[in-house]
Amino acid sequence: MSTAAQDHPAAPSPGPRAALAVMAVLAELSFVGASMLAWAPLILLQAIFLGPTVAAVVGVAFVLGTWWVVQPPAPPAPVLLRREQAPALFAALDALRERLDAPPLHGVALVDELNAAARLSGGFLSLVGGRRTLLLGVPLLRLLGPQEALAVIAHELGHFSRHHGRLGHWIYIVRAKWDVYLDSDPAHDSGIDRLRRWIASAFLPRFIRLSMQRSRACEFEADALAARACDATSLVQSLARLELADALMRDGLRTRLHELQAASIRPPAAFWDLVADSLRDEPAARQAATLEAGSRRPARRNDSHPPLADRAGALGEPVAPPSWTDAPCAGESLLGPLWRGTFDGANARWAEQIAPAWRLRHLHLAALRAGPDPADTAIDPLQHTLQRLQADDEIAASEQSLAALRQHAQSQPDDAPAQYALGLALLARERPEGIEQVRVAIRLDRRFAVAGYGAILSQLELHGSEGELSEFTRRRALAAEKLESLDTGLWQHLLKEELAAPPPWARALLLEAIAEDRALDACWVLRTERSNDAGQRFTLNIFVARVCHDLMAADEVDEDLLAARYGSYLRTLFPHNELARVMLRFDTEVFHPPLLERFARLPGCEIRRPTRPINVDVVRIDSL
């Protein structure tokens, strides 16, 4: 253990903590006060007609009600482990708590994330009362050794052992309410929102700077406590493993998954074993380069964790590639007999979540490799060639596949999809020239703006400055705003305007993709043209679905998940300068008969025929 790790961490200076708490109180009161302005005329009328006493009572009631409404919703309560299920884990927690002088936990929960967290929930503004829950990611327990996992757990308990965890949680809630007003588009702000934006621009940057400094200081303090309770080497090794795993899932593993996607219609059944094996097989030189690149990553406005190099340096430890062995992982050691079923469940949930999109992408890759059907006149040869080149690059991720995309783009300098595909390939390799390449495509075709700026932001999240992030967030918001009018009256548009069925190749792929979707009773896919308020003409691909409410509940899927799934189908099959829209109807709702008649008169738009009676025994009537 290093000397630095043996020293007791210095208590945070009370001055900055007090200043930050005061600023947080002012921020909270300002937010509630701005929200209360809408009620001011009503309270004033109460004072005029019913007297000041009644107005004061009403005012207090509105303040308390408004304060309650503007609080963020509580996260879902996790399923907690019982002590008898994992005695080794709870024994280790008891020993760590004693060493750290940490307060008792209210619960320990296993989650499917590659992470661990100390969650404080409930209580009055998270300052009084509340429940302390330790969240342990099952993937984390697979990738770490026992000592490394205990060091991470000690770090999380360290947040509970000092007051900084409670203050930090409350400050995070306050900051989250205000942060949206720094980057969002002000075009349609109400008067209250304009006031909030003015307050945010004048006050919030300093509050964020102070709170981020405070949050990072808390991380250093929790690190020192963990090193004191366990050892600094294990903690730094665990952080290095997480840095490498994050980089692998962002880059290297993507190519491997594309290879598997091309080979099998089913996603891998043991995904987190695949991650562990890929990390173990990665050359040490590449791991060292990844760790070095991570130390140069710019700090983000809302990133409370210091870079790995700074955290290791504070503990007096070097950052080096960890050793990967076949020794029992932390999950086996800490959870015992419970581990195998828990780990298999995490893998199964990952596969279940990704299976629908995986299935369609596999079918699409197979169709691209087979080549276009000469009898299908709806296939655009140029588009098919471009999609084939993109698929080859996703799977190979080589300089040769990139060169083929570049050559195609150079041969079609005015073709926005070709320029866009090259830009995406460059961004996937985290090359900065990809940003300008995507912008070339956007200048050629403004319909790429929303998707293109989103792809650029993904790159800037890793390598861009705060100014660049803010600029492209604003650009994306403005581009998205121009699409809002396309959704107004869309059901009526389907009744009156010209519609087309999807091309036969797309219909065939969708039919196979939804084969195992139990909750989907019927669906239709339509293509139509529509202009926004700025006069831009867009192609809309619309997935109209009728879903079974009871089967959704049985499969534990909700409306948002299905909408995201069906939208991803359309974005997989059609170019990014076309728009995807999903329109859902439950089988307990009325389906507009004239719309069904219109669908019946359009051959090829019906992907799945209804199996349940329509407009029979409905419990609610919705109009268009």
Image (tube, rainbow, N blue to C red):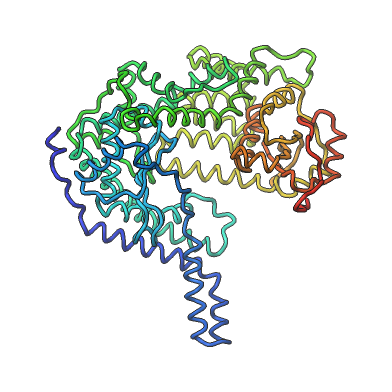
Which residue appears at 85% of the width and 45% of the height? 593
Image quadrant holding the N terminus, namely top left
99 in relation to 202, above or below: above
Please state the horizontal and vertical placement of residue 424, each as a whole percent of the image: 53, 26
**Quadrant location of residue 244?**
top left
Residue at the far front in the pictured view: 84
Residue 393 location (% of width, % of height) = 54, 17
Q: Is 68 positioned to the left or the right of 612 in the image?
A: left
* Residue drawn at 70 percent across, 23 percent down: 512
| Residue 395 is at least partly visible in this image | yes
- Left/right placement of residue 311 relative to residue 200 reads left
Image spot of residue 425 (x, y percent)? 52, 23
Compared with residue 551, is residue 276 higher up or lower down, i.e. above or below?
above
From the viewer's perspective, is residue 137 above or below residue 408? below
**Looking at the image, residue 404 lies above or below residue 530:** above
Q: Quadrant of residue 514?
A: top right
Q: Is residue 410 left or right of residue 494?
A: left
Q: Quadrant of residue 507?
A: top right
Front residue of 191 and 369? 369
Q: Between 238 and 393, which is closer to the camera in this rendering?
A: 238
> What residue do we see at 67% from left, 16% from top?
367
Residue 431 in sight: no
Question: Residue 588: horizontal and vertical position, in percent?
Answer: 74, 47
